[in-house]
Amino acid sequence: MTEIELIEGIRADVAVHGKATLAALHMIEEGLKIFPQSARLWILRGDLIQLSDEEAPYSLDDALMSYRTALEYEPGSIEAHESIGRFLDAVLDKPAEAEPYFRKAILLGGSETAEEGLTQVLEQLGRSE
């Protein structure tokens, strides 16, 4: 199985169930054994942890660690920077800590969603650009 096939299979499982099932979490862990340096899989792991229910053996700290691991393997990952920014802002309510991640995502060529994230963070901080 390729990395792309694994990601597609996990996303299909989440789409069918409307959440990250224990099976999807198991698939991502198995995938990381095969592709341990895949930033995409680490980002997906963080997303799955957030989409899982209380049965899952993970905490929000595990989600943040997953995004940070993705950055370790791929420091230029726009998606990892944006994922950390969104997590820090929306989940942990730490807009000041989220700001540099959105800025870096934009600097790396990020999309409108990174710009929207930065705008939201700056509004929360009472600043504008």
Image (cartoon, rainbow, N blue to C red):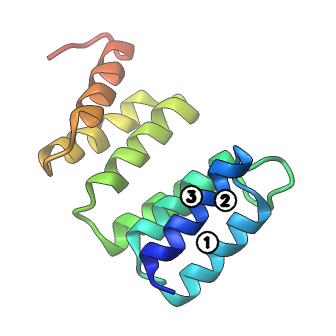
Please give the residue where the numbered disc 1 appears in the rendered image: 28
Q: In this view, does 115 lie to the left or right of 8?
A: left
Quarter of the picture containing the C terminus is top left
Between the C-alphas of marks 2 and 1, the distance is: 11 Å
For the point 46% across and 58% down, the residue is 67
Give amino acid for label 2.
Answer: Asp
For the point 70% across and 47% down, the residue is 19
Please give the residue where the numbered disc 2 appears in the rendered image: 13
**39 relative to 82, above or below:** below
Q: Are marks 2 and 1 in contact (CB under 8 Å)?
A: no
Give the mark nearer the N terminus: 2 vs 1.
2
> Residue 97: x, y in percent?
39, 37
Q: Label 2's element?
A: helix
Q: Can residue 60 be seen in this view?
A: no
Mark number, residue 11: 3
Q: Is residue 39 visible?
A: yes
**4 relative to 2, above or below:** above
Q: How crowded is mark 2: few (under 14 residues within 10 Å), some or many (20 or more)?
A: some
Q: Is residue 23 left or right of residue 80?
A: right
Q: Label 3's element?
A: helix
Residue lying furthest top: 126
Give amino acid for label 3.
Answer: Arg
Q: Are marks 3 and 2 in contact (CB under 8 Å)?
A: yes
Between the C-alphas of marks 1 and 3, the distance is: 10 Å
Q: How crowded is mark 1: few (under 14 residues within 10 Å), some or many (20 or more)?
A: many
> Residue 42: x, y in percent?
49, 67
Give amino acid for label 1.
Answer: Ile
Q: In this view, does 54 lie to the left or right of 63?
A: right
